[in-house]
C-alpha cells in the first residue's frame, strides 16, 4: 500500500527532531514557560517605567505629536493623517485610544498599547523558537537577548511608526510558516486571511513593510506544491499579493509632496562606508552619543554625523547596543536630547564592546542562511523552513533601507543609519544567530556559557535603560 497523503505531508514538515537532553537542559525545559513569562514581564516593566518618565518622547517627537493631535480631531473612525514619510497607522491608533479613553494623556496611553503589542511580538518569537531551536537553554537565551536589546526596548516604546511595525512583521513570519505547514484547506484559508490582514496592517504602520509583499509572492512560487488546491493558490495570490499591493500603491500615492522625512537623491554615503569598516570606527567602542562633539581639522563638529567618517556597520552596532539618542536617560528638564551621566556612559561603553560577538554571530547566521537558500530543495526536510522564512523577510526589510543609503541625501545628518529604521530585520538576524548556535553547540558547557552571556548582557542593558527623571 502507498503512504497516506497526511503521512507524506507530515514527513516534509520542518519540526526539530527530538534529541536526548542532559540534566541541565531538562531542568530548563521544566521551567521554560515560567522563564518566558518572567522575561516578558521584566521587559514590559522596564518599558512601562520609561513611559512613566516620558520615555515615549523620542525621535521626531514634535512631528508625531502634532500629527496625532490632528488625527484625534477628525470624526471617528477616520483618523487618517499622512505626514511626510509617515503612514497613518500610528496616528490612527492614537485617535482610537483618545476616542476610547477620553484622556488628554492619550499619547502616553498609546505607548502603553504599543508596548503591549511588542510584548506579544516577543511571545510569537518565543513560539517560533520552540519550533526551530532544539535546546531549551538556547531558546531562553534567545528570548533574553531579543527582549533586552537596547534598541528594541527603546524603539518599541517611543511613540513612532518603528514601534508599530514589529508585531505585523513577526506575525507575517509566523503565519507564513504555519501556512506552509498546514494541510487542511479550511485551515489554509483562515491562515491566508490572517496573513493578508497582517500584510495590510504592516503597510499601514510603516511603508518599508511593503517589502514583505514581493517576498510573500516569491515564497508562494517556491512552495506552491504545499498549496495543492487551485482555489487556495488563487486566493493566496489575491489576499497576499494583489490586495496588499494595491493598498501599498494607494498609500504611496497619498504621500505628501513636501514635509518631514521626504528623501531626495544624493550621493553622500559611499559604498565603502556601507560595506566596509573605516579607521574612525574604533571610536564607536567608547559609546559616543548622537551629538558627540569633537575637534576635526580645527573645527568643532558632530562626530557621528560627519559624512563617511564612520561606516554603516559600526554606526548600526552602536545604535543597537546603546541609548545613542539618550531617550531613556535622566533629565530634570525633559529636553529633546537628554544628557548622559558618567555611570551610564561607562556601562554603554562596556555594552558596545561586549556585544561584538553577538553582532558577528548575527552577520554569520544571515550569510549562512542566505547561502543555504541557493542550494536548498523545496522537499528538503529538517527544521530549515522557519529559519529561511525569517531570513527572507528580514533581508528584504533590511535591504529596503540599507541599499538605498548611498543614494540618499543627509544619510548621516538625519540618522538614517539608526537601528530603529531596520528594527524588525535586526530582530530576525538575532534570532537566526541562536538557530545557528543550536546547530553548532554540542556541549552543555558551551550552552551554559551562552545562557550566562545572554543573562549578563540583558542585565547590563537594563541597568542603563532604567529611566529616572520627570
Image: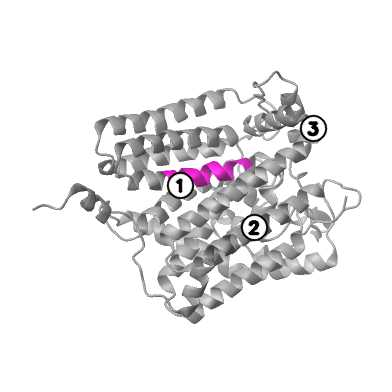
Give the color scheme: rainbow, by chain, secondary structure or one colour.
one colour
Question: Which region of the structure is painted magenta?
Answer: 164-175
The residue under the point 41% across, 41% down is: 215
> For the residues carrying marks 1 and 3, which lies nearer the camera in this image?
3
> For the residues carrying marks 3 and 2, which lies nearer the camera in this image?
3
Q: Which tag, 1 or 2, sits closer to the chain's start? A: 1
Q: Which residue is mark 1?
A: 173
> For the residues carrying marks 1 and 2, which lies nearer the camera in this image?
1
The residue under the point 40% across, 40% down is: 216
Callout 3: helix, strand or loop? loop
Q: Which tag, 3 or 2, sits closer to the chain's start? A: 3
Q: Find the residue positioned furthest to the right.
A: 333
Vertical arrangement, residue 321 with respect to residue 237, above or below:
below
Q: Find the residue positioned furthest to the top.
A: 75
Crowd around label 3: few <14 · some 14–19 · many ≥20 (10 Å): few
**Magenta includes 406?**
no
Is residue 370 toward the left or the right of residue 414 in the image? left
Residue 103: give its label. Answer: 3
- Give residue 309's quadrant in the image: bottom right
Vertical arrangement, residue 347 with respect to residue 43, above or below:
below
Q: Position of residue 329 (x, y in %)?
A: 81, 56
User: How far apart are the two marked residues, 3 and 2, measured between alpha carbons?
Assistant: 33 Å
The residue under the point 52% across, 44% down is: 169
Q: Which residue is mark 2?
A: 320
Does residue 282 appear anywhere in the picture? no
Q: Main secondary structure of the magenta part?
A: helix
Is residue 331 toward the left or the right of residue 367 in the image? right
Residue 65: give its label. Answer: none
User: How far apart are the two marked residues, 1 and 3, measured between alpha carbons?
Assistant: 35 Å
Is residue 25 toward the left or the right of residue 305 in the image? left
Amino acid at each position: 500500500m502507498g503512504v497516506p497523503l497526511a503521512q507524506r505531508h507530515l514527513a516534509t514538515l520542518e519540526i526539530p527532531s527530538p534529541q536526548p537532553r542532559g540534566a541541565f537542559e531538562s531542568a530548563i525545559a521544566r521551567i521554560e514557560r515560567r522563564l518566558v513569562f518572567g522575561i516578558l514581564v521584566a521587559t514590559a516593566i522596564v518599558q512601562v517605567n520609561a513611559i512613566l518618565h516620558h520615555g515615549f518622547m523620542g525621535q521626531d517627537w514634535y512631528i508625531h505629536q502634532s500629527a496625532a493631535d490632528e488625527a484625534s480631531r477628525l470624526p471617528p473612525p477616520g483618523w487618517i493623517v499622512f505626514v511626510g514619510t509617515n503612514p497613518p497607522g500610528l496616528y490612527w491608533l492614537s485617535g482610537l485610544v483618545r476616542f476610547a479613553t477620553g484622556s488628554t494623556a492619550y499619547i502616553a496611553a498609546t505607548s502603553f498599547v504599543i508596548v503591549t503589542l511588542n510584548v506579544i511580538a516577543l511571545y510569537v518569537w518565543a513560539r517560533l523558537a520552540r519550533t526551530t531551536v532544539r535546546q531549551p537553554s538556547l531558546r531562553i537565551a534567545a528570548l533574553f537577548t531579543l527582549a533586552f536589546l537596547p534598541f528594541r526596548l527603546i524603539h518599541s516604546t517611543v511613540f513612532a511608526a518603528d514601534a508599530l511595525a514589529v508585531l505585523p512583521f513577526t506575525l507575517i513570519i509566523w503565519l507564513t510558516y504555519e501556512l506552509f505547514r498546514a494541510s487542511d484547506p479550511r485551515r489554509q484559508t483562515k491562515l491566508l486571511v490572517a496573513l493578508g490582514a497582517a500584510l495590510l496592517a504592516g503597510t499601514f504602520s510603516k511603508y518599508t513593510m511593503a517589502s514583505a509583499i514581493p517576498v510573500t509572492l516569491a515564497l508562494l512560487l517556491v512552495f506552491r506544491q504545499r498549496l495543492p488546491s487551485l482555489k487556495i493558490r488563487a486566493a493566496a495570490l489575491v489576499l497576499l499579493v494583489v490586495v496588499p499591493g494595491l493598498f501599498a500603491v494607494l498609500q504611496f500615492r497619498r504621500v505628501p509632496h513636501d514635509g518631514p522625512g521626504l528623501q531626495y537623491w544624493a550621493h553622500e554615503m559611499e559604498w565603502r562606508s556601507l560595506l566596509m569598516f573605516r579607521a574612525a570606527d574604533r571610536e564607536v567602542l567608547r559609546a559616543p552619543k548622537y551629538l558627540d562633539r569633537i575637534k576635526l581639522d580645527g573645527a568643532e563638529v558632530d562626530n557621528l554625523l560627519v559624512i563617511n567618517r564612520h561606516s554603516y556597520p559600526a554606526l548600526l552596532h552602536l545604535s543597537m547596543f546603546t541609548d545613542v539618542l539618550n531617550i531613556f536617560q535622566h533629565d530634570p528638564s525633559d529636553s529633546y536630547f537628554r544628557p548622559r551621566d558618567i555611570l551610564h556612559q561607562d556601562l554603554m561603553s562596556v555594552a558596545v564592546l561586549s556585544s561584538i560577538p553577538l553582532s558577528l554571530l548575527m552577520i554569520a547566521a544571515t550569510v549562512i542562511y542566505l547561502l543555504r537558500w541557493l542550494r536548498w530543495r523545496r522537499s528538503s526536510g529538517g527544521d530549515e523552513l522557519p529559519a529561511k522564512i525569517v531570513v527572507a523577510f528580514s533581508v528584504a526589510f533590511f535591504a529596503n533601507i540599507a541599499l538605498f543609503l548611498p543614494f540618499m541625501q543627509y544619510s548621516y545628518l538625519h540618522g538614517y543609519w539608526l537601528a530603529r529604521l531596520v528594527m524588525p530585520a535586526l530582530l530576525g538576524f538575532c534570532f537566526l544567530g541562536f538557530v545557528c548556535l543550536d546547530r553548532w553547540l554540542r556541549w552543555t558547557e558551551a550552552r551554559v556559557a551562552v545562557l550566562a552571556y545572554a543573562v549578563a548582557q540583558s542585565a547590563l542593558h537594563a541597568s542603563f535603560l532604567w529611566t529616572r527623571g520627570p
